[in-house]
Amino acid sequence: MSENAPFPIRSWSEDDKPREKLMLKGKAAVSDAELIAILIGSGSRNETAVDLSKRILAASGNNLNQLSKLSLQQLMLFKGIGEAKAIAIIAALELARRRKITDAPAAEKVLSSRSIFEMMHPIIGELPHEEFWVIYLNNSNKVITKRQLSKGGITGTLVDVRLVYKHALEFGATAIILCHNHPSGTLIASDADKSITRKLVSAGENLDIKVLDHLIVTESNYYSFVDAGIL
């Protein structure tokens, strides 16, 4: 074996094997690459699972959020990653995203645009596509429920005004908050954003249901129509 040839995991000391390392030292002692290596189980003839995992992470800027945005096909472009391994990575990262939603502290009462952002960011802040959500509130500004209204875009044709208020009447809501994400990271309200907001405000006035705010959420920040003085 040449001096630079990689050693298979089975030849490592027990202290260095990812699975054994997790068992002996705990999950906090295991690196991101080692966790991915545990998921995929094996590398290739010329590369250990850990080295393969490091290569995948490096291609994603060593950023798990960026890695979570890779599709099945994109992951399978890495030599040594077949369909089963790609699915295992995607499933693990999706579980992490769902756990984040579950663990996010539910803002029982909306107090500010920041509280709306903290409520919605775990749900839509890191998505690769746009989604439009409505938060339904009672007369104490407490959240009754949240509903996704559309996925993939934000235009008047994709957000059904009638459906928004049909839900509001069913839930007995007296106010709503509009929220959608910008995967691009742009914190600017487009003409389409403003147009659908005006339509929903106008329709709500006839039903005595107030639109309290419209938030645009990105991976790290938010834009509030109320804070910006346009609602």
Image (tube, rainbow, N blue to C red):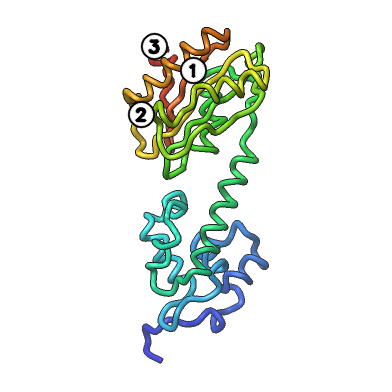
Residue 189 position (above or below residue 205):
below
User: Which disc is residue 213 wearing?
Assistant: 1
Please give the residue where the numbered disc 3 appears in the rendered image: 229
- Residue 187 image position (x, y, % from top left): 35, 29
Mark 1 surroundings: few (<14), some (14-19) or many (≥20) residues within 10 A: many
> Mark 3 vs mark 2: which is more N-terminal?
2
Task: Quote the CA–CA distance across marks 1 and 2.
Answer: 15 Å
| Location of residue 191 in the rendering, given as x and y in whole percent from the top left corner | 32, 23
Q: Residue at x 44, y 83 (%)?
A: 45
125 and 35: which one is in front? 125
Q: Residue furthest bottom?
A: 1
What residue is rendered at 64% in x and 32% in y? 105
Q: Are marks 3 and 2 in contact (CB under 8 Å)?
A: no
Residue at the disc numbered 2? 187
- Residue 109 in percent (x, y) is at 64, 20
Quarter-wise, where is residue 208 in the image?
top right
Q: Residue at x 56, y 18 (%)?
A: 176
Residue at 57% over, 30% down: 119
